[in-house]
Amino acid sequence: MRIDLHTHSAVSDGTDTPTELVHAAAAAGLDVVAITDHDTTASWAAAARAASETNLTLIRGSEISTQLGPRSVHLLGYLFDPDEPLLAAELDLIRDNRVPRLQEMTRRLQEQGVLVTWDDVLEQAGSAESVGRPHLADALVARGFVASREVAFATLLGWQSPAYVAKYSPDTAAAIRLVRAAGGVPVIAHPWAGGRRGALDLAMIASLIDAGLAGLEVDHLDHDDRTRAELRGTADDLGLIVTGSSDYHGTGKQGYGLGVCTTSPQSYEALLAAAGPNGVDVVG
Ligand code: AMP
Ligand code: ZN
Ligand code: FE
Ligand code: FE
């Protein structure tokens, strides 16, 4: 069984439609794929229709933007009820705030003489429900300011850049409780990505157990072997499910191909068992 539990479509900052993503996952030989667009469930219906036409099992999820003190923490929520009002309202709030935040980043770039417009960004975002820095990066590429999303993040859009504006995000523990209350399974995504080993230390991760944290994403391209070994130890110590994924973004992130990292069948079974009775089922 090949299981990839974290992917993005063009409903957020990936480049495949949800239908294309599901077909690409089947073609890549995956048995299970999770669609986890940032702060939205708008990809679920199309992905479910596509999955029901293949042999693939679809896990419906979202990668939720949260913060633990000053740290940005991405929280994968799986199998939650998308209509549970408190969680749905929080996702709306995060998503709605992404718009003025990205407009302010665009304005700051203009101030620096980087003449990219909000219309450029909207053109790149297309029908995305959840807009983000990758769409601004694509606008910068289209205008010829940078060669790729990667270069845009490294030069103009990273958190240390003058144009950077933080986005609204709820407290991690609060978001974990919302996912659980909606019947879902909360897993911290790439806890030590970007070479930030120990970014969330054992005590911080342990503090999320009471809120209902279920798992840690360990096998991810942004984690080197030593990081994975340490995180696996942390997960063992705390009784957390270990997951793995590609964090696929279509052509938006080079090298992060579907199935490049995967989740074990044992972890997958544990994840399914952790879902609440009010959550949604897998498709297929
Ligand atoms: P935002 O949510 O608007 O702050 O944008 C963050 C998103 O940008 C992340 O979810 C990544 O998918 C994407 N991202 C971050 N760094 C890079 C990079 N170096 N190259 C391409 N995409 C990136
Ligand atoms: Zn992304
Ligand atoms: Fe992430
Ligand atoms: Fe992601």
Image (tube, rainbow, N blue to C red):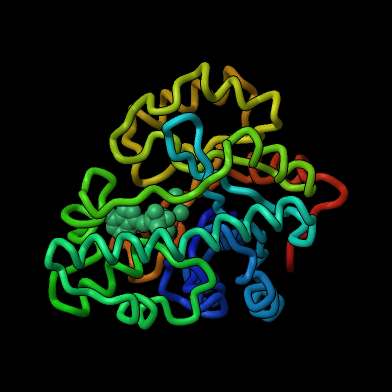
Q: Where does the image place residue 89, in percent across and percent down from the top left?
A: 70, 56
Examine the rendering and report whether any part of residue 146 can be seen: no
* Left or right of residue 92, residue 245 in this image: left
- State the residue at coordinates (60%, 63%): 40
Question: Which residue of the protein is positioned furthest toward the right in this rendering?
Answer: 277
- Quarter holding the N terminus is bottom right
* Left or right of residue 202, residue 92 in this image: right
Q: Where does the image place residue 12, in percent across and percent down from the top left?
A: 48, 67
> Which quarter of the figure has residue 141?
bottom left
- State the residue at coordinates (58%, 17%): 237
- Quarter holding the C terminus is bottom right
* Left or right of residue 116, residue 206 in this image: right
Number of labels in the image equals 0
> Which quarter of the figure has residue 175?
top right
* Left or right of residue 150, residue 188 in this image: right
**Residue nearer the viewer, 279 or 170:** 170
In the rendered image of this protein, does residue 92 appear above or below residue 219? Answer: below
Examine the rendering and report whether any part of residue 232 can be seen: yes
Q: Where does the image place residue 50, in percent across and percent down from the top left?
A: 64, 79
**Residue nearer the viewer, 29 or 22:** 22
- State the residue at coordinates (50%, 44%): 74
